[in-house]
Image (cartoon, rainbow, N blue to C red):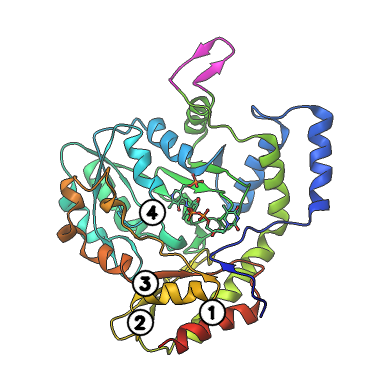
Amino acid sequence: MSNKPIYVTQPYLPPLEEFIPYLEQIWDNKILTNNGPFHKQLEQALCDYLGVEHLALFTNGTIALVTALQALRISGEVITTPYSFVATAHSLLWNNIKPVFVDIDPDTCNLDPDRIEEAITPQTTAIMPVHCYGNPCAVERIQKIADTYGLKVIYDAAHAFGVQYKGESLLKHGDLSVLSFHATKVFNTFEGGAIVCPDARTKQRIDYLKNFGFADEVTVVAPGINGKMNEVQAAFGMLQLEHIDEALKRRLEIEARYREALADVAGISLLPPPPDTHGNASYFPILVDDDYPLGRDALYQKMKDAGIHGRRYFYPLISDMPMYRGLPSAMAENLKHAHQIADRVICLPIYPSLLDEQVDAVAALIAKAK
Ligand code: T4K
């Protein structure tokens, strides 16, 4: 194996020459942004690929989250998970909404549906769960709670590109789902994101909001933001779609190889494969137990010393960050499972160009560490 460092991920990039004809088209027609031809094509192509009705492209996933909350006029308190990338909760603060953290189910790392109802108050307007690592949340239970209490559900589906649950797109659940197409994601447009929505009227409103609130040349209907995806990103997305099946297939092979190699390593636990799910192997988390010869941080460092850059996604918890830790729901007693997982997790390298021998070397280092 070469001595080049191995990172937790590496973006999928198609052969450069395949991108040139796309750039030539942009240079010819001189439409660089503002719902240009590639933007329109990619919205339709992604709807077809993902099996969803409507989708609005964005410049990144975070602006898409912020806009999703505005599109549904969410205010007051929103129930969410502390075990995520910080953008999930930041999108609430950007809208002056109070996050209410609820503990996770340690088998899925997603919001524990048994803990949601006790966190609902008269100020609660929505639930924002995350399909962490692409593992489906308890979507039916969450919808039932939302229906009972009259709440909206916005899924942070940043990790869930292409995930099928019970034979259908996971993105069909909830009122809205938000994707990220960041460089580190399964499907990337360098930066990028999208909101998946159920009807044309909601998409229309989202499209106004991502374009400063313009409904036509002279009418501004909301204090919208500039959240538009540009034509280079959208063209790149069209090209990426040609390769996505191959990229997902390789990810799943790597996931299976890790699972087999690590299944019997004493002191290392893996998350159970989620039921009824065809996943996307976007991340490969392992949990370092007390009976492993090294603590989590010692193993993380040992891997790093060997040039294997795993990541502790998601440590520290969002609820421990300075802008959140004063909230009553951020108290450690309220979030026991989230703390236990955050203190034990390492995400191993997983990406399409990772070689079998590299996967084996990562697994061997973990199996032999003393
Ligand atoms: N919600 C959730 C649940 C999310 O996970 C995210 C993003 C969002 C919302 C927000 O979506 P966006 O607004 O980002 O579209 C990364 C990403 O920046 C972030 O997008 C992602 N989640 C988060 C989980 O991971 P970092 O700070 O860990 O990234 P960084 O730069 O350390 O990259 C990790 C490794 O990937 C590097 O060590 C090397 C490799 N890499 C990275 C980049 C950017 C490359 O090889 N090439 C690259 O271009 O946050």
Q: Contact (CB < 8 A) between labels 4 and 3?
A: no
State the residue lying farthest toward the front. 305
Nearer to me, 176 or 70: 70
The yes-or-no answer for disc 2 within 8 Å of ligand 1 is no
Circle 2 or circle 4, nearest the eye: 2
Q: Is residue 260 visible?
A: no
Horizontal arrangement in the rendering, residue 190 relative to residue 29 (left or right):
left
Work out whether mark 1 precedes mark 4 in sequence or the reverse, and give the earlier one. 4
> Cα distance, mark 1 to mark 2?
16 Å
Nearer to me, 205 or 328: 328
Q: Which residue is mark 3?
A: 297
Q: Which residue is mark 1?
A: 362
| Label 4 CA crowd tier, 10 Å (few <14, some 14–19, many 20+) | many
Residue at 64% over, 82% down = 357
> Cα distance, mark 3 to mark 2?
8 Å
Magenta span: 212-223
Q: Secondary structure at mark 1?
A: helix
State the residue lying farthest toward the top. 218
Nearer to me, 37 or 229: 229
Amino acid type at image mark 3: Asp
Residue 166 image offset from top left, x and y in percent? 47, 64
Q: Which residue is mark 4?
A: 130
The yes-or-no answer for disc 1 within 8 Å of ligand 1 is no
